[in-house]
Amino acid sequence: MNIPVKTLASGFSMPVFGIGTYGMGGLSTIDPANDDNADIAAIKAAIQRGVTHIDTAELYAQGKAEQLLGEAIKGYDRQRLFIVSKVYQDNLAYDNVLKSCEESLKRLGTDYLDLYLIHKFNPAIPLSDTLKAFDELVRRGLIKHIGVSNFCADHLKEAQRYTENKIVFNQVHYNLVFREPQRKGLLDYCQQNDVILGAWRPIERGMLTTDLPPIMKEMMQKYQKSAAQIAINWLVSQPNVVTLSKSTNISHLEDNLGALTWEMSETDIRKLTNEFPGQQDVSNRQPLSDEILKEYNNQQ
C-alpha cells in the first residue's frame, strides 16, 4: 500500500506511519540470544507492505538495531526509504555529535539520514553546541533534516534559535492515555509552527487493545475497526501528527496499517480526545524535557 504523507509549509514531508526498532538486537545492551534474522525479516516485511519510514537510534542495543536495519534495507532503493536515527543524550557535544552520526551511517550502510534527532534533552550540554554540529552535518550532506525527541515547547523554541535550519520534527510519548504533549501546549505549538509531532507507543505496548472501555468498543462497532486501528487513526487524524510502532508480528503490522485507509469523523476524534478514560498528564516512560530540567536542577 502507499502510506499517506504529511507535508509542512516548509516543504518537508514524511509518511504518517513508520516502524520502530527499539528492542531489535536487544534493549539498552546487545542481547546475545536475540533472533537477528527475525528482526531483519520483520523490517523487510514492513517495507514490502509499503512502510518506508523506519526509526532507530545509536542507543538501541548499543548500535545493534542500526546494524540490523542496515542489513534489512540492502537491495532496496534508498531514495524510497525514510530513515531516522538519533544521537544519544551523552553524545551531544559538537565533536561527539559528528562522530555519532558517522558511526550510525556506517552501521546502517547508508550515505545519509533523512532525519536526525537529538534523542533526549541534556541540560549539562549547551543546545547551541549540539545544533552547530547538526548544521555541519546538513552542510556535509550526511543528514537531510533536523529534529528532536522528548522536547517540551520551550526547549524546542530554544533549539530553533541555535540552528540555521528548520527543526521539523519532535518525537514524543503521545496516545489516547498519555497526553503530556497536549496538556503542556506542545501539540498546539507544533501545529502552529510547522513542526511534525511523532507519537511513539500509539497503542501503549498493547494496553489500548485490552480491557477496552465502552467508548473504544463504541468506536470499534461504528467503524468496524480494531482497537489498534482506532487508536492509530485518532493520532494521524490530528494535524501535524504522525506515529510509529514496532511490530515483529506480521498480522499486527497489517492490522496497524489498516488504520490508514479510512477517516474518523471530527466529532468522534473530539469525543475520544475528551472522553477516553484514564488520561495521564505526564509520560510514565519519558517525560518532556521541562520535567528533565526540573529533576536536573533539583540535583544541583
Image: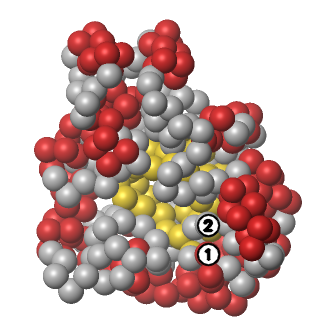
The amino acid beneath tag 1 is Gln
Q: Residue at x 40, y 17 (%)?
A: 264
Q: Is residue 54 left or right of residue 165?
A: left
Q: Which residue is labeled 2 in the image?
A: 120
Instruction: Tell me how the rendering is colored.
Output: secondary structure
Q: Position of residue 129 (x, y in %)?
A: 79, 78
Q: Residue at x 49, y 87 (%)?
A: 103
The amino acid beneath tag 2 is Lys
- Mark 1: secondary structure: helix
- Depth order, front residue of 77/236: 236
Q: Position of residue 20 (x, y in %)?
A: 37, 59
The answer to whether any part of residue 222 appears in the image is yes
Q: Which residue is labeled 1 in the image?
A: 89
- Quarter of the picture containing the C terminus is bottom right
- Depth order, front residue of 275/267: 275
Q: Is residue 89 left or right of residue 125?
A: left
Q: On the image, which quarter does residue 42 sit in?
A: bottom left
As measured in the structure, the alpha-carbon distance from the residue carrying label 1 to the one carrying label 2 is: 5 Å
Task: Evaluate if marks 1 and 2 touch, with contact meaning CB atoms under 8 Å apart.
Answer: yes
The answer to whether any part of residue 144 appears in the image is no
Mark 2 crowd level (few <14, some 14–19, many ≥20, 10 Å Cα): many
Q: Is residue 28 left or right of residue 185?
A: left
Q: Position of residue 62 (x, y in %)?
A: 40, 83
Q: Residue at x 59, y 39 (%)?
A: 281
Number of labelled discs? 2
